[in-house]
Image (cartoon, helix red, strand yellow):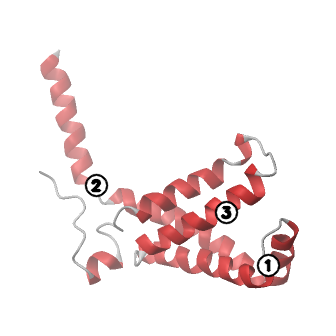
């Protein structure tokens, strides 16, 4: 029984090592799809976005609407291309933390209505603290990150 468990463990480790670089790719693509879409909607509807921001108490809504829309849109593009993902991850996490607080937590929303925001926050933080992975412009242009090296 012990040898069989060890065999399964080695197989899982081998698979993990083989496909290590797909994990940040999948996280980046998920973030890109959502943030590009939401950022584009904000940027193409700035008046409505600013009005909404003002209604929930965000200061300087006329300035914050294009700023947040830009962070979401260009942060999403950064995730898609895999360049500057750590900086984009920090900025996107900040946007999600503020969004969670202003639209969900302070409004007393149940946890079920916070799920997407929480997942987007967690994924953004994951990219803030990790590299973009092998399938990214960061890995082509810079050599500092060597994820997926198996020992």
Sequence-first disc among 2 and 1: 2
> Label 1 vs label 3: CA separation?
13 Å
**Residue 76: image x %, image y %?**
54, 74
Q: Earlier in the sequence, mark 3 or mark 2?
A: 2
Q: Residue furthest front?
A: 59
The numbered dot on residue 61 is 1
Residue at the top extreme of this rendering: 1
At x 28%, y 54%, the residue is: 19
Task: Measure how far apart labels 2 and 1 are at the Cα level.
Answer: 41 Å
Q: Which residue is mark 2?
A: 20
Asked which quadrant contains residue 81, the reply is bottom left
Using the image, determine if residue 27 lies above or below residue 44: above
Disc assigned to residue 98: 3
Callout 3 crowding tier (Cα within 10 Å): few <14, some 14–19, many ≥20: some
Mark 1: secondary structure: helix
Q: Quadrant of residue 46?
A: bottom right
């Amino acid at each position: 029984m012990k040898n069989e468990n060890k065999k399964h463990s080695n197989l899982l480790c081998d698979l993990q090592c083989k496909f290590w670089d797909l994990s940040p790719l999948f996280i980046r693509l998920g973030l890109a799809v959502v943030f590009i879409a939401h950022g584009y909607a904000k940027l193409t509807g700035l008046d409505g976005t600013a009005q909404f921001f003002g209604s929930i108490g965000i200061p300087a809504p006329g300035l914050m609407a294009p700023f947040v829309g830009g962070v979401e849109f260009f942060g999403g593009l950064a995730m898609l291309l895999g360049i500057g993902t750590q900086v984009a991850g920090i900025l996107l996490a900040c946007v999600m933390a503020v969004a969670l607080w202003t639209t969900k937590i302070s409004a007393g929303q149940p946890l079920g209505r916070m799920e997407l925001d929480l997942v987007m926050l967690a994924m953004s933080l994951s990219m803030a603290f990790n590299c973009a992975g092998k399938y990214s412009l960061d890995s082509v242009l810079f050599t500092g990150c060597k994820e997926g090296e198996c020992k």
